[in-house]
Image: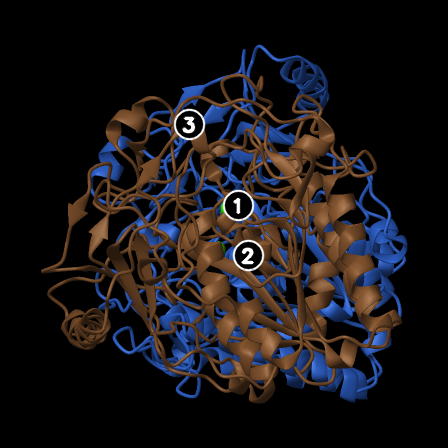
Chain colours: A brown, B blue
Amino acid sequence: MLMDDMGWGDLGVFGEPSKETPNLDLMATQGMLFTNFYTANPLCSPSRAALLTGRLPVRNGFYTTNGHARNAYTPQEIVGGISEDEILLPELLKKKDYVSKIIGKWHLGHRTQYLPLNHGFDEWFGSPNCHFGPYNNSFRPNIPVYNNSLMKGRYFEEFGINVKTGESNLTQIYLKEGLDYISRQVTARQPFFLYWAPDATHAPVYASKRFLGKSKRGRYGDAVMELDHSIGQILSRLFSLGIDNNTMVFFSSDNGAAVMSGPLESGSNGPFLCGKETTFEGGMREPAIAWWPGRIPAGTVSAQLSSVMDFFTTSLAVAGLVPPDDRIIDGIDLSPVLFNNSLVNRPIFYYRGNQLMAVRVGQYKAHYWTWSNSLEEFNKGINFCPGQEVPGVTTHTQEEHTIQPIIFHLGQDPGERYPISVLSEEYRDVLRYVTAVVEQHQKDLMPGTPQLNMCDLAVMNWSPPGCEQLNKCLKGPESKPWKCDWPH
Amino acid sequence: MLMDDMGWGDLGVFGEPSKETPNLDLMATQGMLFTNFYTANPLCSPSRAALLTGRLPVRNGFYTTNGHARNAYTPQEIVGGISEDEILLPELLKKKDYVSKIIGKWHLGHRTQYLPLNHGFDEWFGSPNCHFGPYNNSFRPNIPVYNNSLMKGRYFEEFGINVKTGESNLTQIYLKEGLDYISRQVTARQPFFLYWAPDATHAPVYASKRFLGKSKRGRYGDAVMELDHSIGQILSRLFSLGIDNNTMVFFSSDNGAAVMSGPLESGSNGPFLCGKETTFEGGMREPAIAWWPGRIPAGTVSAQLSSVMDFFTTSLAVAGLVPPDDRIIDGIDLSPVLFNNSLVNRPIFYYRGNQLMAVRVGQYKAHYWTWSNSLEEFNKGINFCPGQEVPGVTTHTQEEHTIQPIIFHLGQDPGERYPISVLSEEYRDVLRYVTAVVEQHQKDLMPGTPQLNMCDLAVMNWSPPGCEQLNKCLKGPESKPWKCDWPH
Ligand SMILES: [Ca+2]
Ligand SMILES: [Ca+2]
């Protein structure tokens, strides 16, 4: 269960003051809560590609080289998508006769060859892109919603989202799809994988009528309440079907809260610095819960440094599989953590594009590059760190600190406000072993071919498969590819 | 149980990432957690005076008029203290045959007439002031530690605090005093009130050997762990003595985390703005738990706007008493909240000195004055909002907004980052009812005589009662009173 742009601080159990996530809080008391869990990138597409491949975006190709240290994703005009050389989790699970379904947002490329059913999934209900819009369908088509390999309609048309009121019943549709799929597999005694990826907390934020206005936190809080309620429904279904003792459930989010969108359209990163798009903790530290009654001890809290990529390796292990041995896998098997509450030593790497921005080893985080966004963007009102400013850290120019990284102790200073003095013994000690970790990492690093460099208006969702039956095919422009501009 | 300078974000249950407060988190699951709980002032002394009188500092005299909107407390050179006209909780509890003890920090004045045993307490173990020091005893005496009405030694002398290592066994002493007192009262079948007020989380932060270095959060975290452990011990003692079903326990802190002291000497205010000394949420929103197995429903979360002053009125109600009717009491009786999970409509007032800085009504907070500290102080490195800056809000000059207050929706925007547009209908509606609340408040307001205006080196703790027996009397200077300088 992967949320979209939900922040660490959005769960009651992680300190959201209004405490409006009773189902997730209960899930935590029934399972294991991760306090040091990370995404692989502060943006949707690379994070999701990392989850499904177990590999850093710099390896699986979900990055750009059009600019230095730029965030890239898969808007409609993107030409690329997930490489056919990458092996996705559902492809591997087939070896043990699992069927797989994705519900919700895909975001690994929207051209036909990149869609989920061509990468191991047996079923899909959802969309290849973000639910931006509405568009007028002449300069830019509305985003299609697929059922398996065929389009069933478009956002803002058959699948309504009222941008003004924030009303949409999409989460309810995704919930029903999930419950139906689970029940079907149990009836068929079929091992299954469900990748439930709703996007109600991504701007434009939406909730269904029943939840609109119910939260103390405004529309964003309404969306969180509906997702929390849905997660409660899904877990209840596992109980009522009697498969709770035989089902591992992970919950997390793809990147930090999009605080640049303001309070009505974004969540909370709790005590952490900045948000989505940045490699500060607010951009990459994620809420995470693992749940498996009878196997994962109830009510445990793990300080394990862990990653969305670990879902890949751990899921394989639990299914009795090993990851491919012809490539480097960054995700680790969390089984010892989940089942024995062990702690495994491992670093966390923070990338922006193909630039290693920072690394965390133990409680220490070393920043090699700092950047929030350009002064030009910032002066237009785009602020990745509203209300926050740490001089020399939340910089508006790309600042290199490779020779003398800025080091924080995240236990003492989770907000990355007080750099450790470069003159201290502590700094010298940390620098020594962090340097060794980074050298080891970079020695083995073979960047994948960047998939997010080229854009073309012709590749947009003009005529997705299935549009003919619905009479919803649109005519796009001639192909005119350009190097995508990634401003931050 | 009142902590010193502990922040909202220091408890696991309120989102501290290291989750090192298992006993407090358990206390919350056994009791009621308050998410909108406030102190009456962002500083120790006025907050503690408000707790014991049920009245705002502007009424009970714990403020200064030496400057506009200044924070004042009771350092050693203060002449004043709690007025004899004020009626303190233990004085009232006597009517129902309760005995009362304070353990730890008093801070309502250190001259003999102001000490706890002259204001209703039957026993005291602790200190009248903060544990600042060490001093050389010639220009400034070390702070005395009392047992009842006699001094037993001084901090940094008989009661050691190693400022370098942070080692002190004071919390263990305060714990033992608390456990002994409770056990004695149970043996005597004596109704009792215990005001347990340790100060390990106030700079210079300390912990005993067993806890030093044990936390992931450094020395401050060690202090928190020891306090958390002690609270667990106290609650366990109530269980083992069989009085858990007959004892109401409140937990909170006197003001927000002192973030100006840096990460080793201060805690976390979670998602809130700034800290101690300010009337932003980080200065006055406090962690709070109410506990009474069998009476307060386990595991409940209350969004009630509540205050440290409510402890006064609620404790009286539970003891079968009513507050004095010859004066205004600001604390309300939380019984309907605690026992029926009701919500009571009431505002929260944020004062600095005798200046009303802000008011909260429902989810809205209106700032009439904004100030962090002066630019002069700030430029010396004293920062009440490290890493945070909200333009026009965290101002370094005192800014008046009485005509057009800055209004935040704390549900949507707990970090006070996005003022509501003054052009919106929402703003106009909120302003109307907030104005009515403030007018009502100010109509009834009769400020008490300010007790914190005069300072004098002669009144310092040179020769506290009991010093003769210990041969620890010191000679102070001649009396030379001056108007205390309160810089912020
Ligand atoms: Ca996202
Ligand atoms: Ca204090």
Q: Amino acid at mark 1?
A: Thr
Q: Amino acid at mark 2?
A: Asn
Marked residue chain, label 2: A
Q: Earlier in the sequence, mark 1 or mark 3?
A: 1
The residue carrying mark 2 has its beta carbon less than 8 Å from ligand 1: no
Q: CA distance from mark 2 to mark 1?
A: 8 Å
Asked which quadrant contains residue B287, the reply is bottom right
Neighbour class for label 3 at 10 Å: few (<14), some, many (≥20)? many
> Could you say where residue B303 lies in the image, as x and y percent from the top left?
73, 47
Say above or below: A226 vs A263.
Answer: below
Q: CA distance from mark 3 to mark 2?
A: 23 Å
**Residue at the image point whose x is 77% and y is 52% from the top:** A177
**Residue at the image point whose x is 90% and y is 58% from the top:** B320
Q: In what element is the residue under mark 3?
A: helix
Q: Which mark is residue A118?
A: 2
Q: In what element is the residue under mark 2?
A: helix
What count of labels does the image hold? 3
Residue identified by numbered label 3: A457
Q: Are marks 1 and 3 in contact (CB under 8 Å)?
A: no
Between disc 1 and disc 3, the foreground one is 1
Q: Are marks 2 and 1 in contact (CB under 8 Å)?
A: yes
Residue identified by numbered label 1: A112
Q: Which mark is residue A23?
A: none
